[in-house]
Image (cartoon, rainbow, N blue to C red):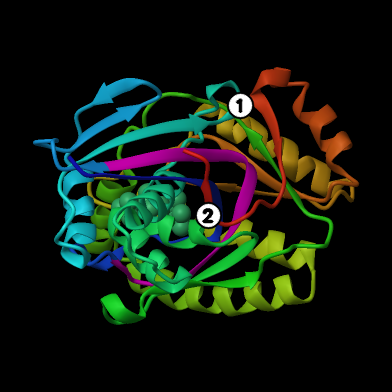
Amino acid sequence: MTSQIASARAHTNIALIKYWGKKDQQLMLPMNGSLSLTLDHFYTDTTVEFNSIYTEDTFYLDQKKIETTKITPFLDLVRQMNPQVGFARIYSSNHVPNAAGLASSASAFAALALAASTAAGLNLTRRELSRLARRGSGSATRSIYGGFVEWQPGTSDLDSYAIPIDEKVDWDIEMLAVIIDRQQKKISSRTGMQRVVTTSPYYPAWITSTNQDLSAAIQAVKEHNLQLLGQLAESNALRMHALNLSARPPFSYFEPASLVAMEIIEKLRSEGICCYYTLDAGPNVKVICSKAESPQIIRALSTAFTPEQIVEAFPGPGVKLIEC
Ligand code: DP6
């Protein structure tokens, strides 16, 4: 019996300029580039053990055995790189305060990419890890790095990967997550984004405007311009959600409470507080703001949400190996 084992931790990331559509579904190549912030609070720990006695891949999430069709094709990519390794057992745990509904495929596949490739004896560079993580879930491409991260769309498997824009983040920015629903998404991001690509008449405008947003947002990060970054992130998110409303059949991730949170943020802004929101493929609202102003924002959100629904998060690190 030969056993090879490794464990890794990856943090989730929230896109400020969104990835919403693939040009190649098999290689997971995105239609446009995106920009995200990796968060400290939410992460996944994953252990992979390849063992010659195993006869199939088995996946345990938070100690429960999960049937999924996503793990084996992903591990097959690792086995292509090292055909010596056989089947694996994978143990993952999500560390998300209060089961916040923010566990994501981004941290899951970034942690799996590092743990599986290390257990297989491969010593991949971060660029190679980013390309590998991409094959599990697009947003995982960016969770290889900490801080602000750009995913360059590329034209092939070789040149579609993330690069760090500002890994250390030594300026005043935080994110407040307003937890509105802990349930599974109504429509998975994979299905939703493909539907807009094929049916929304606005999709070409999304590409043009997102490319402009991306260059401006990268510049805003470099200049530590929170206000401009927030403005760009909010309008980019609203355009992504507008695409969903313009798809056939239309769909939306907003819940009534999402609109309540958005209105609170807009009102705070009219009072001179620098805060902006973004939403992904679900109803939770994430607020971009400064640490200096977050107490006031939390107070305003507390008029409509419980303390358990408001979670503070700060810039977090990239993927790393941990003790098994
Ligand atoms: C709205 O990465 O979950 O969060 O690549 O199909 O696994 P797949 O989709 P996923 O989509 C993320 C969409 C988003 C925007 C973003 O993270 O850029």
| Magenta residue check for 40 | yes
Residue 256 point in image, percent of width and height: 53, 27
Q: Badge 1: how crowded within 10 Å, few (<14), some, or many (20+)?
A: some
* Element at label 2: loop
Q: Which residues are magenta?
A: 29-49
* Element at label 1: helix
| Magenta residue check for 93 | no
Q: Which mark is residue 267?
A: none
Residue 35 point in image, percent of width and height: 55, 66
Residue 178 point in image, percent of width and height: 63, 32
Residue 250 point in image, percent of width and height: 30, 45
Taking 93 as reference, is 53 left or right?
left
Q: Quadrant of residue 198?
A: bottom left
Q: Badge 2: how crowded within 10 Å, few (<14), some, or many (20+)?
A: many
Residue wearing tag 1: 97
| Residue at 80% over, 31% down | 298
Decide: is 10 above or below 299: below
Taking 209 as reference, is 118 left or right?
left
Which residue in the rendered view is the most extreme toward the left? 55
Quarter holding the N terminus?
top left
Decide: is 43 above or below 153: above
Residue wearing tag 2: 319
| Residue at 78% over, 21% down | 303
Give how far apart the Cα atoms at labels 2 and 1 are: 19 Å
Q: Amino acid at mark 2?
A: Val
Compare marks 2 and 1 and give the one earlier in the sequence: 1
Decide: is 83 above or below 90: below
Q: Amino acid at mark 1?
A: Pro
